[in-house]
Image: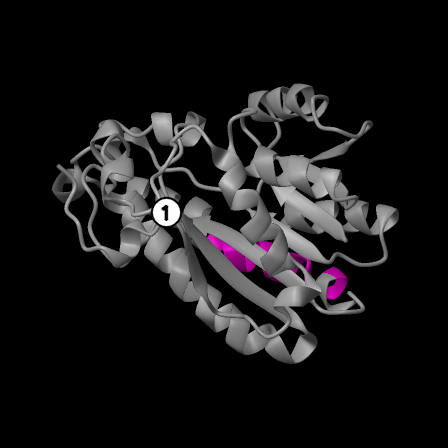
Amino acid sequence: MNLLITGITTQSSIAYAIAEEAMNQGHEVIVTNPPGRQFSICERIAKRLPKEPVAVLPMDVTDPEQIAATAAAVGEHWDHVDGILHAIAFAPEKALGGNFLDTEWADVATAVHVSGYSLKALTVGFRSLLGAAPHGAGVVSLTFDASVAWPVYDWMGSAKAVLENSTKYLARDLGAEGIRVNAIAAGPIKSLAGGSIPGFAQISDSWGDHAPLGWDTKDATVVAGPALFLMSPAARAITGTVLHVDGGYHAMGAPLV
C-alpha cells in the first residue's frame, strides 16, 4: 500500500508506530508535518524509520494551498494513495486543563480547525489520489472517545467530537468513490501530544486498572495493527466507524479514580 502518514512528533508517538509497522510490512510511506520547527524535528525522527530515505513533505492542514501543493507532490511519487493517517491535533493551552468555561472563541476555533475540520480538508484535498486506489482507500484518524466528558480535556474533547462526526459524513459522501473513513479511539499514550495536556495523568495513570486487558501508556504499537487494517482492503466494508483500541476500557463504565 501507498500510505501518507501525518503527525509524527516523536518516536513515542502513535503516528511513528504506525509508520514503522507499515514499513516492516513492506508498505510505502510518505510523511508530512507542518513547516517550521516541527518539520525539522520530523525530518530527524523519520531517519529512524526502518527504510531510508523517507520522503518528508511540509503541510499545514489549516492552509488549503499547502494541502493542494502536498497532494501534487505526492502525486509525483505515486499515482494513487491507499491510505492516509490523520494524526493531527492541537489546542491552545487556555482551551485545556479545566478552563472550559473560560475559554475564548479564538482558542476554541483553533482547536476545532486543527483537530476536527482538518480531517475533511485533508481527505478532500487528496480525494483524487484516494479515489484512484485500485482496491479502495482508507482514511484513519485518531480520536479520544468524544462520547463522554473527560477531566482536563475540555475543548479538545469538543474538537474530537467534530472529528468523529465528520468521519460519518465523509463516509457518507465519499463511499461511492471507494473511499472509507474511520477513526480509532485509542487509550491514553504518554507521547508529546498527551504530555502537553495539563493534568493528563488524571486520565492516563489509572486507565490500566479499569481496562480488562490492561493498558501500557508507553506502548503506541498496539494501535499500529488496527490502523493498518482499516487502511487496507481487508476493511473494504467498514466505514464511518470509531474503533476502540483501549484495552476494553470503553465497555466497562469504570470511573477514573
Quadrant of res 63: top right
Extreme-bottom residue of the structure: 176
Q: Residue 64, relative to residue 215: is it above or below?
A: below
Residue at horizontal 57 percent and vertical 44 percent from the top = 224
Residue 95 visible within the image: no
Q: Is residue 206 left or right of residue 215?
A: left
Extreme-front residue of the structure: 213
Q: Residue 119, relative to residue 200: is it above or below?
A: below
Prevailing SS of the magenta stretch: helix
- The span shown in magenta is 117-129
Residue at horizontal 60 percent and vertical 24 percent from the top = 36
Quarter that holds the C terminus: top left
Of 211 and 189, the residue lying toward us: 211
Q: Residue 45, relative to residue 147: is it above or below?
A: above
Q: Is residue 192 left or right of residue 14?
A: left
Residue 6 visible within the image: yes
Q: Amino acid at mark 1?
A: Gly
Residue 226 in percent (x, y) is at 55, 52
Tally of marks: 1
Quadrant of res 234: bottom right
Is-magenta flag for residue 110?
A: no
Residue 198 in percent (x, y) is at 25, 27
Of 51 and 57, the residue lying toward us: 51
Circle 1 residue:
247
Residue 83 in percent (x, y) is at 67, 55
Residue at horizontal 82 percent and vertical 28 percent from the top = 53
Is-magenta flag for residue 122?
A: yes
